Amino acid sequence: MEQGPFPEVHRIVADADLDGLCAAAILQRALPRTEVVFAHPALVRSGHLDDVIDRGTVIVDLPFHPACGWYVDHHLTNRPDEDAAAAFEAAGGRLDWAAEPSAARVAHNLVAPFSDLQHLAKLMPFVDAIDSGGIEREVFLADGPLVRLARCLGTSQAEFMHHVLGLLVSGADERALVEDPEVATRLAAAAQDRQAAFEAVHARTTVVDRLAICRMEGLPQRASGYLVTAHVGADADACCVIHGHVDGAVERDDRPPLSASFYANSFYEGRRRVDLSRLATLLDETGGGHANACGCRIQAIDATGAAEDRPVEAEDVERNLAQWLALWATLPELA
């Protein structure tokens, strides 16, 4: 396998979702001696990975960090501005940002000329679709193996993610991946857990001004934007999902802090199309993502939306929601 014209790196730091996992596998195919660290955006933005990221690090599918040596991503709000990009490249960094449906697709386009990636031919379109809001409602509701696999990932599942990573790097295709005994066991459990998540979404979702609000805070289950919008159907143009715990912390995989995720209702063609990242960045300067899928942390604010210097409390969820709903009502339609 030819070594492509890539920077000399010893570490890959990737998002702990299906897109980040596949992107990391593609990069590790080209750079087999690199270690992989799975993380999430808040860990990068909060500085918890400052000791991990250096010039020998490639960051993929996560927020930009100027200390890395190579940056690969596709999120609009993560893209460094012209000054930051120029300073990064002047210091020897390599920037590969592209408006692709997934970070894995960006990595694939870079690596494919130098490494055989044919085993990912069927997996890549699914990764593109699920990461960019392009998955069809029927495919999601059918809950096939890849849909379930996407639910089995996260920083709390690092050991399993490294197992899947090893399979992908070694050349496993979609069929070999889902038939692997450990993967198959996880997928079977995910199928059983889905009913509990559906029930929680049904009980905890309300629609306000065509924004579906799903309150999952304090629960062990997580609800994806796909799950919520599949539940509400044409009654909402987008959704806001609250997860986490009042006493949570960004470095605790088992008890994350209160956060919100915003997703467009990709199952409803007649939806009002707006830039949801404006909601994610309204109160949290470290929030962001895509115009149709993004997130942020719940902020400690007063009733007017002004920041307060104190720990986040349960009532802040209501205060944050009030600010988001006020902005949601005024967001202009995208051209």
Image: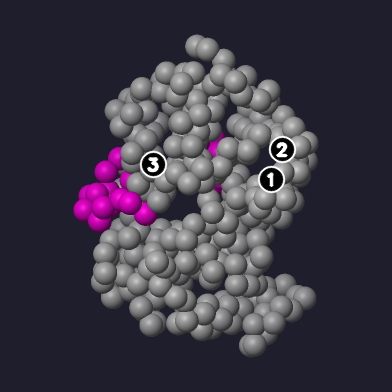
Q: Is residue 214 visible?
A: no
Residue 51, above or below 118:
below
Disc number for residue 148: none
Q: Local crowd at mark 3 within 10 Å, few (<14), some, or many (≥20)?
A: many
Let me know if residue 17 is in the magenta part.
no
Kindly state the secondary structure of the residue where label 1 is placed.
Answer: helix
**Mark 3 touching mark 2, by CB under 8 A?**
no
Precedes in sequence: disc 3 or disc 1? 1
Whole-angstrom CA distance, mark 2 to mark 1, is 6 Å
Name the side, left or right, on which 164 lies relative to 285: left
Give the image location of residue 333, x and y in percent. Answer: 40, 72
Rendered residue at 33%/39% (across/down): 125
Name the side, left or right, on which 308 lies relative to 77: right
Q: Which residue is mark 3?
A: 127
Q: Which residue is mark 2?
A: 89
Residue 63, above or below 59:
below
* Quadrant, the C terminus: bottom left
Q: Local crowd at mark 2 within 10 Å, few (<14), some, or many (≥20)?
A: some
Query: Of residues 273 and 34, which is closer to you in this image?
Result: 273
Amino acid under disc 3: Val
Residue 74, above or below 91:
below
Give the image location of residue 140, x and y in percent. Answer: 28, 52
Give the image location of residue 207, x and y in percent. Answer: 36, 79
Amino acid under disc 2: Glu
Q: Which residues are magenta?
A: 133-161
Kindly state the secondary structure of the residue where label 2 is placed.
Answer: helix
Q: Which residue is mark 1?
A: 85
Name the side, left or right, on which 304 lies relative to 20: right
- The quadrant in which residue 263 appears is bottom left
Rendered residue at 58%/78% (across/down): 320
Amino acid under disc 1: Ala
